[in-house]
Image (spheres, rainbow, N blue to C red):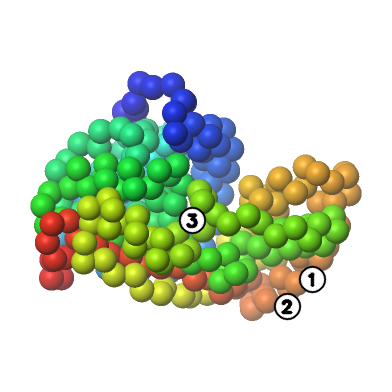
Amino acid sequence: MRSVDRENSGANADQAKYWAEHGGPSWVRDEVVYDMMLAPFNHLLVEALAARPGERVLDVGCGFGSTALAVAAAGASVHGVDISPPMVRRAEERSAAALVGATFTVGDAQEDSLGGPYDAVTSRFGVMFFADPIRAFRNVAQATRHGGRLVFVCWQPLDRNPWMSAASDVLKALLEDPTPPPPASVGPFAFGDTAYLDHVLTNAGWNSISIAAAETPIRMGGNDGVAGAVDHALSSSAARALLSTGDDTLQARAAVILEERFQALSINGQVSFPAAAWLVSAALGGRTQDT
């Protein structure tokens, strides 16, 4: 595993700390759950990217490698970068087992050299966490050849993704906390506003920008059904923050309510929630190549 020799300081220091100490280990632990949940968007993304054999592809915020490995399986040479060492280690393990052309680096895609030039850049929900997104997408552009393409998925606003707010809504009610969350500037829903997203990409040097709705049911809890969905919901960073403000009974009380609500959404033991993302494409210095 290659990594950038740098302290966790600077613009994305908080993100680096979170994904190294909490987010990364959590995602690796629940890898199967996340892969099941995000599979519909992964398929959509890989299809839209349409990487050709021999192309060089950069996967930004590659996580534990699901998208990179799927793209590499089509014959492309993929390099993934992520700020989370635990996730990059897992991506390398998966790549070695799959015997595909994918390499991975621990790094900050906003600040660090990304190599290249790449024919295409992709990301599955990995580009919403930059402190300075214009700087980040400009850095990505510098690693992309003229005429190269960008294809990624990011979340629509929180109110279009009830799977994410289910636990927080219950916990806030139990805590009698009606305070709405502040507008997202960094985090999963940072690009919910398409006008802002278009502004970021345009000012970073990308053109031929297309933003299309991608909405599909997702499966929560993996193979563990309702119990798994409850555990997953209560493990989110937002839920953990609320749990830390309550007493020792708060989690158990919330779990009872969530279990009842998720049971109503369960079909054949699987909990399904509507989910909404944006499928975004852009080009660098020219029109996106025909696919």
Q: Which mark is residue 35?
A: none
Q: Is residue 91 left or right of residue 148?
A: right
Q: Is residue 30 left or right of residue 207?
A: right
Mark 2 lies on a secondary structure that is: helix
The residue at which mark 3 appears reads as 190
The residue at which mark 2 appears reads as 264
Please provide percent x and percent y for residue 246. 84, 46
Q: Residue at point 85% right, 55% down? A: 175
The residue at which mark 1 appears reads as 260
Say what amino acid the circle numbered 1 marks. Answer: Glu
The answer to whether marks 2 and 1 mark residues whose Cβ atoms lie closer than 8 Å is yes
Quadrant of the frame with the C terminus: bottom left
Q: Is residue 74 visible?
A: no
Say what amino acid the circle numbered 3 marks. Answer: Ala
How far apart are the two marked residues, 2 and 1, measured between alpha carbons?
A: 7 Å
- The image quadrant of residue 241 is top right
Q: Is residue 114 visible?
A: yes
How far apart are the two marked residues, 3 and 2, measured between alpha carbons?
A: 30 Å
- Mark 1, Cα crowd under 10 Å, few <14 / some 14-19 / many 20+, is few
Q: Camera-side residue: 248 or 281?
A: 281
Q: Earlier in the sequence, mark 3 or mark 1?
A: 3
Q: Is residue 25 left or right of residue 8?
A: right
Quadrant of the frame with the N terminus: top left
How far apart are the two marked residues, 3 and 1, measured between alpha carbons?
A: 31 Å
Say what amino acid the circle numbered 2 marks. Answer: Ala
Nearer to us of marks 3 and 2 is: 3
Does 139 sit above or below residue 50? above
Q: Residue at point 70% right, 60% down? A: 180
Q: Camera-side residue: 177 or 195?
A: 195
